[in-house]
């Protein structure tokens, strides 16, 4: 546990008894989330495409934290593979309390839309929309049977704004936000909740290679991402279901004390003025 967590008095057993399924768990933010949730007492199943690296990551986490882990290999855009993987998690752990949809691709080239490779562009969009959609279809029905569970979809600052580059990533993340809101509305009153969680800018191989971050010095600490995800998993932020929360900007305790109103932290058109009929 990091010094930041210790200063906040984090309960390292707050997720004891929970089972988390984290996609994209072999590297980057997914790897940090898998380890951080394990440190807090959760049993963690990691899912990724690369079997060897994933098995190594989950084995290392089990040794470091003492928590049960499981490695399941699948491409999140492959429906049959996801069904098999989720079945393996349920067979091993019996339940899934927390699904974190973290896996996703980035634009291969920093170019405007008309110069992007169409197939790679669409692969990126699919990874952020089809992937979470298939995971939700495989996991949420079991949560509904128990009347409890939480889904965290990894959002981004680019979920809410566009740039000339990274267009596929932005489109995918924006679509994922709308999927989260639709899911949360459908889940109202069931005991199952869904959230958009932006992780800030954690230093990973992907972010370090992006031109917009090459001179960055103020990186988000991985422990901050884990802290916000753990607050969601523990049920402290259920009032924010269907809404966008931002690591490094939002303090979990302050969010807990401020119930959201109307369409706060949801995607909406801004009216052009008081006479805008769309307002």
Image (cartoon, rainbow, N blue to C red):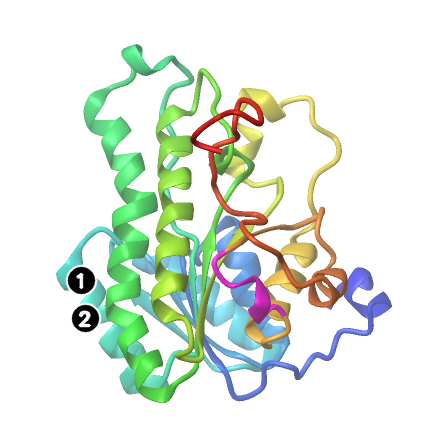
Q: Nearer the viewer, residue 64 or 232?
A: 232
Residue at (69%, 56%) from the top-left corner? 224
Residue under numbered circle 2:
84
Task: Classify residue 86 as left or right of residue 175.
Answer: left
Q: Which corner quadrant of the image does residue 185 belong to? A: bottom left
Relative to residue 46, is residue 216 depicted above or below?
Answer: above
Secondary structure, mark 2, is helix
* Place of residue 219 in the rendered image (x, y in percent of width and height, measured from the top left): 70, 39
Secondary structure, mark 1, is helix
Residue at (35%, 51%) from the top-left corner? 179
Marks 2 and 1 sit apart, C-alpha to C-alpha, by 5 Å
In the image, residue 40 lies in the stretch drawn in magenta: no
Residue at (56%, 41%) from the top-left corner? 204
Circle number at residue 81: 1
Q: Which corner quadrant of the image does residue 181 belong to? A: bottom left
Q: Residues within 10 Å of mark 2 (few under 14, many from 20)?
A: some
Q: Is residue 63 visible?
A: yes
* Place of residue 59 in the rendered image (x, y in percent of width and height, measured from the top left): 46, 71
Residue at (82%, 68%) from the top-left corner? 8
Q: Which residue appears farthest toward the front when viewing the image?
A: 275
Q: Residues within 10 Å of mark 1 (few under 14, many from 20)?
A: some
Task: Classify residue 1 as left or right of residue 67.
Answer: right
Q: Nearer the viewer, residue 220 or 32?
A: 220
Q: Which residues are magenta?
A: 237-242
Task: Classify residue 147 as left or right of residue 260.
Answer: left
Q: Which corner quadrant of the image does residue 111 belong to? A: top left
């Amino acid at each position: 546990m990091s010094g930041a967590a210790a200063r906040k008095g984090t309960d390292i057993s707050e997720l004891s008894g929970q089972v988390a399924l984290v996609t994209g768990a072999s590297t980057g933010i997914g790897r940090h989330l898998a380890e951080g949730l394990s440190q807090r007492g959760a049993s963690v199943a990691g899912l990724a495409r690369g079997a060897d690296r994933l098995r190594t990551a989950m084995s290392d986490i089990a040794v470091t934290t003492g928590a049960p882990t499981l490695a399941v290999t699948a491409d999140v855009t492959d429906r049959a593979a996801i069904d098999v993987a989720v079945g393996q998690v349920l067979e091993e752990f019996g339940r899934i309390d927390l699904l974190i949809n973290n896996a996703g691709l980035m634009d291969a080239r920093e170019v405007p839309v008309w110069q992007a490779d169409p197939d790679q562009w669409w692969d990126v969009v699919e990874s952020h929309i089809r992937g979470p959609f298939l995971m939700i279809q495989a996991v949420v029905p079991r949560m509904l049977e128990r009347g409890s569970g939480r889904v965290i979809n990894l959002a981004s600052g680019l979920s809410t704004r566009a740039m000339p580059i990274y267009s596929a990533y932005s489109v995918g993340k924006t679509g994922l936000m709308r999927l989260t809101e639709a899911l949360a509305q459908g889940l109202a009153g069931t005991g199952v909740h869904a959230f958009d969680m932006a992780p800030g800018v954690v230093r990973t191989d992907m972010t370090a290679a992006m031109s917009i971050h090459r001179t960055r010095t103020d990186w988000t600490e991985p422990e901050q991402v884990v802290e916000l995800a753990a607050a969601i998993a523990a049920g402290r932020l259920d009032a924010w279901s269907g809404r966008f929360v931002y690591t490094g900007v939002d303090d979990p305790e302050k969010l807990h004390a401020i119930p959201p109103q109307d369409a706060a932290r949801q995607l909406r058109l801004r009216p052009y003025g008081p006479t805008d009929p769309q307002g």
